[in-house]
Amino acid sequence: MSTENRVFGKRAQKHIIILASGDKVRHMTLRPWMAALSVCFVSVFSIGYLAATSYLVLRDDLIGGTMARQARMQHEYEDRIAALRAQVDRVTSRQLLDQQVVEDKVEKLLQQQMALTSRHGKLDTLLDRAEESGVSAKETPSVITPQALEKRADASGGIKAIERLMGMGDKKAPDVALAYAPTGGRETLSDRADRMFSKVTLSLKDIEQQQKSRIEGLTAGAAEATDAIVGILARTGVDLPAEALAPQIGETTDVAAVGGPFVEPETAGAFDNSLVALDSALARLEQVRSQAKKLPFNNPSPQSDITSRFGNRLDPFLGRLALHAGIDFRASVGTRVVATAPGTVIAAGKNGGYGNMVEIDHGNGITTRYAHLSTILVNVGDKISSGEAIGRSGSTGRSTGPHLHYEVRLNGEAVDPMRFLTAGIKLSHYIN
């Protein structure tokens, strides 16, 4: 039995399903929508079953792929981190190495600056000695003081600026390692440090060269003065002892008992050698000048005129030719007579035709005599300094009137005192 329905414009037939079991017969009417619903349910169930089965079958592969992908991403991330750490380590190592190099350079520059400052201290003492000795070096640069040195260094970038740049001062330089990273053409810390080092080094070298030039000029000036004094002394006929011409560094002019093995003076390079040379030149000048000051180069009666010179003349008493062993100064009775050089009084009293006479030993075989004195102011054995009053002029002994008779004797032989008086005038520029 069937019925008809209209589906999509057509009449759909009903389906009757008959179920027979023995004597029992059952039947079901299957309408079209129920068939469609059953087909859909079976299809959905089949798809779900197939999907569940596929998931169960492929789950391990999916999980394994996901884990592999995550592991691969993790490895890539770790590799990137390792690469960045290696880069940071390289940058840090380079920074530490460069900073060590810069610190060494700064230490070297500080040592140079301290050396120049120390040298200036030594040079300052020599300059004082040179000034006291009247030594000058014309057309030479003036010496740079430590204050000027620091100013010059700061003007060129300065060691302090380098210390601040490298974080060596009171404040540490922040993120120093970042200065070594690529800067897109900008100046790096190392470049700035090298530029500053170059400027400061050139500045220090310039200062050192100026100091050396000054020292060389002073050394030449001291040597020139010494040679001039020696030349003037040679024309007087006086031969200075060898020890007087040799530099006596650090010793006094008095003779003292000294000794010990010879050891070269302390030096620390060309600059210190130049200091030693200047010290030696000044010591030699001082020694020669000290010896010259012991010689009778002064005038025994500065305010008096010379009336009779050294040499043969007519004797005023006998009227015949005779040797005048000294020179005479016009001086009224009581005129002050002074020693022409330091020495020791070896005679003070009456001495024949000399009348009242004072004789002084100046060393090196040189003695001076002061005759016809009215008054003697010293005694035998007295130590006399140059310019000290030893008596007063008069007309005692073989004399025609008040005057001073002055003699200079070299190894017992009378020599022309004018040699020494003329030499004294020339030496006044080098001694006084």
Image: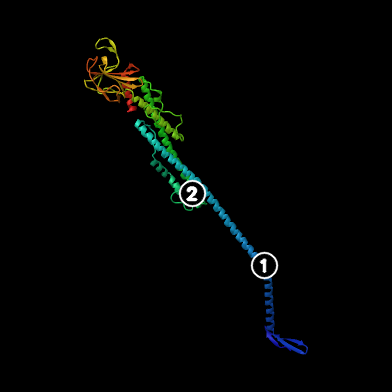
Q: Nearer the viewer, mark 1 or mark 2?
A: 1
Q: Secondary structure at mark 2?
A: helix
Quadrant for the C terminus, please.
top left
Colouring: rainbow
Q: Amino acid at mark 1?
A: Asp
Q: CA distance from mark 1 to mark 2?
A: 57 Å
Asked if residue 66 lies left or right of residue 176, the reply is: right
Quadrant for the N terminus, please.
bottom right
The part of the image, by quadrant, that contains residue 286 is: top left
Residue 289 shows which numbered tag? none
Q: Amino acid at mark 2?
A: Leu
Q: Is disc 1 surrounded by few (<14), some (14 to 19) or many (20+) residues within 10 Å?
A: few
Q: Secondary structure at mark 1?
A: helix
Q: Residue 338, position in %: x, y?
A: 27, 23
Q: Residue 7, position in %: x, y?
A: 68, 84
Vertical placement of residue 281 versus 154, above or below: above
Residue 225 seen: no
Residue farthest to the right?
22
Residue 366 seen: yes
Residue farthest to the bottom?
23
Residue at x 40% of width, y 43% of height:
150
Q: Which residue is mark 1?
A: 60
Q: Residue 182, position in %: x, y?
A: 52, 51
Q: Residue 213, position in %: x, y?
A: 42, 34
Number of marks:
2
Q: Which residue is mark 2?
A: 189
Vertical placement of residue 204 versus 223, above or below: below
